[in-house]
Amino acid sequence: QKEVEQNSGPLSVPEGAIASLNCTYSDRVSQSFFWYRQYSGKSPELIMSIYSNGDKEDGRFTAQLNKASQYVSLLIRDSQPSDSATYLCAAYGNNRLAFGKGNQVVVIP
Amino acid sequence: NAGVTQTPKFQVLKTGQSMTLQCAQDMNHNSMYWYRQDPGMGLRLIYYSASEGTTDKGEVPNGYNVSRLNKREFSLRLESAAPSQTSVYFCASINREYEQYFGPGTRLTVT
């Protein structure tokens, strides 16, 4: 089993709708969890950190962590065309971050 | 604060040539990392340095060497470049909350 898995394919959402992204992780990485946004041709940019069970909100973004089920999710409310990007889930363990392969989000005006 | 800086931004090498990618951070972070990113493969860890004076292999270390020159600087060297090393290379550092910050990347083409 990979340490961090993002299995959903590209996600298309209408402008103003909610985009929902999910990620699962293994026991080997279970300390801290992160969501990164990567625009085409750019480096990953940290958008959310979550360390304990429950929800964490920051503007239009909400991260949810469920340690019992080993998943992390990201909700993007009121999606905007500027949210079109690849979103990477990451988890920290063994002195390093493990990344999922990412999910592409396309917001349709 | 400049954050994490990388040089060069772009590089074209011929097979067999060598080069060093430079990385520096001004956030006083202990740990630094080198990744490569290829289409469909995601980010893959090449080497990392948990603290000044230490380096460790990641997932894909073959063909690369690293030097942690001091707390700020962590360089990646390709001794004999191969076409399979054509990629985008990112340097990153991590803070005490395990939040990782990336440099702008180096786009390397090996012909």
Image (cartoon, rainbow, N blue to C red):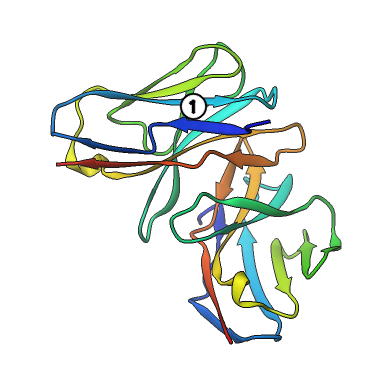
Q: In this view, does B20 lie above or below B93?
A: above
Q: Mark 1 points at which residue?
A: B23
Residue A70 x, y percent position in the rendering: 70, 61
Is B13 situated left or right of B1 in this image?
left
Which residue is rendered at x = 66% and y = 77% of the image? A80
Amino acid at the residue labelled 1: Cys
Mark 1 chain: B
Q: Which of B98 and B8 is in front in this view?
A: B8
Which residue is rendered at x = 70% and y = 41% of the image? B99
Which residue is rendered at x = 51% and y = 55% of the image? A2
The image quadrant that residue B63 belongs to is top left
Q: Is residue B108 above or below residue A5?
A: above
Q: Nearer the viewer, residue A3 or B23?
A: B23
* Secondary element type, mark 1: strand
Residue B43 x, y percent position in the rendering: 46, 49
Residue B1 x, y percent position in the rendering: 68, 30
Q: How crowded is mark 1: few (under 14 residues within 10 Å), some or many (20 or more)?
A: many
Q: Is residue A1 above or below residue B17?
A: below
Residue A69 x, y percent position in the rendering: 73, 65
Which residue is rendered at x = 30% and y = 31% of the image? B62
